[in-house]
Amino acid sequence: MRRSRVGTIAGAAALVAATALGVARLASRRPDPVALLAQAQADFQSGRFEAARAGLDRLATVRPPLPMERMARAQVAEAQGRADDALAEAGAIFDDPALGPLAHLLAGRVEVARHRLRPAEAHFLKAAEGLPAEPQPYDELAYIYNLQHRWADFDRVMLALSDRRGLTFERLLHWGKARHATWDPREDSETLAACVAADPDDRASRLVLAEGLYRLNEIEQAEDALAALPADDLDALALRASFAVERGEDVKAEGLIRDAPPDAPALAEVRARLALKRGDARAAVAAFRQALGAKPNDRALMHGLGTALRLAGEPDAAAECFREADRYDAISPLIARAATSKGSKDPSLPPLLSAACAAAGRLPEALAWARLALTNDPLDREAQQAVHRLEREVGAR
């Protein structure tokens, strides 16, 4: 029996209406991506990391993650200690013009938490390149360079922090302690050992670990740490020879460095000390000067040069070296004063520390203290002049 045309049209209309109603209902249940992201961010800021993760996972079912959502996912993963997930999410947006530098910054923090300092440094350098006005990448780099005793790099990034107004009194005090206080390797050695365990090819950490273990009288462990480095690694060779000299094994030390390049700065200090012990003052003078060329403003080397010059019959030159060492020594009592409970409230300390650092040739540090003095009193004429003079001198280096 033939259906009525009117009935067919009515049925089709009913079907269309039902479909439209279903679509409308589906649309009404479809999550709002903007609202989901906002809620996830609010959960993250409130420390509800699992809720934030769930919200972002739900958002990923609505659409492929946008760069901002990748960044949010990386932040949540970092907060939850999911290192691999954090690195994967951050890595997906390294090339994003806006968020790439922040993703590198996050990836660097994750790698530091895993004690992998080489990839961390690479990420922080990328972040600094993409965020040229921001202090945070330099602050992160300062931690690595301080731990690894890479002092030229440390001074450079601390000055960069000062350039970006990223140095508080406390951070400046940390700079001073790192450069002028006696190193206690106990805590650092544990961290460095973890770094070497996580990345056996981390040469910089391995070298400082060996030195720290030796200072802790863990001689065998110190030598084991150096054993992984090749025989032609001059910094490792210098440490091996220095350990021998300190134990009075001069013949062993001489044998270790006999075939090494005579002009290697890394070996200059141990050669100078061996020359002093055998009474060759002229050789010691030459070696100390070579060592100072690689490490200017090193107090121990300057004092050693003074001793060698005095033995070589040059009392006036020796006296100048000792005066320079004394100028360096004058910084430490001021750092000790700054480290007291009243130090941060003493307005006389920043200009005093600036002057002491400048006298010792520590110009970047002097400039940072002068800037702090000027921040404390923008109308201080002497601070204004010190900042102007030191900026000119540091820029001319």
Image (tube, grey):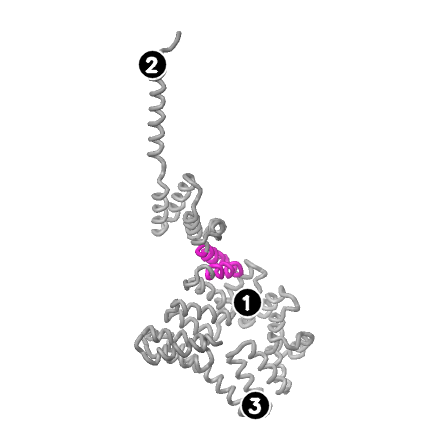
Residue at 48% over, 87% down: 323
Q: Position of residue 63 (x, y in %)?
A: 42, 40
Distance between the alpha carbons at the discs numbered 1 and 2: 91 Å
> Residue 6, which numbered label?
2
Task: Report the residue that reaches farthest toward the front.
Answer: 5
The crowd level at tag 3 (other Cα within 10 Å; few <14, some 14-19, many 20+) is: some
Q: Earlier in the sequence, mark 1 or mark 3?
A: 1
Is 354 drawn above or below residue 8 in the view shown? below
The crowd level at tag 2 (other Cα within 10 Å; few <14, some 14-19, many 20+) is: few
Q: Nearer the viewer, mark 1 or mark 3?
A: 3
Q: Nearer the viewer, mark 2 or mark 3?
A: 2
Is 159 drawn above or below residue 319 in the view shown? above
Is 98 drawn above or below residue 32 in the view shown? below
Distance between the alpha carbons at the discs numbered 1 and 3: 35 Å
> What amino acid type is highlighted by mark number 2?
Val
> What amino acid type is highlighted by mark number 1?
Leu
> Residue 310, which numbered label?
3
Viewer-proximal residue among 390 and 143: 390
The crowd level at tag 1 (other Cα within 10 Å; few <14, some 14-19, many 20+) is: many
Residue at 52% over, 78% down: 296
User: Is most of the magenta stretch helix, strand or loop?
Assistant: helix
Q: Earlier in the sequence, mark 1 or mark 2?
A: 2
Q: Which residues are magenta?
A: 101-128
Distance between the alpha carbons at the discs numbered 2 and 3: 119 Å
Q: Mark 3: which secondary structure? A: helix
Image quarter where the N terminus lies is top left
Residue at 37% over, 71% down: 169
Q: Position of residue 325 (x, y in %)?
A: 49, 83
Q: Position of residue 62 (x, y in %)?
A: 41, 39
Residue on which the image places disc 1: 209
Residue at 43% over, 54% down: 98
Q: Nearer the viewer, mark 1 or mark 2?
A: 2
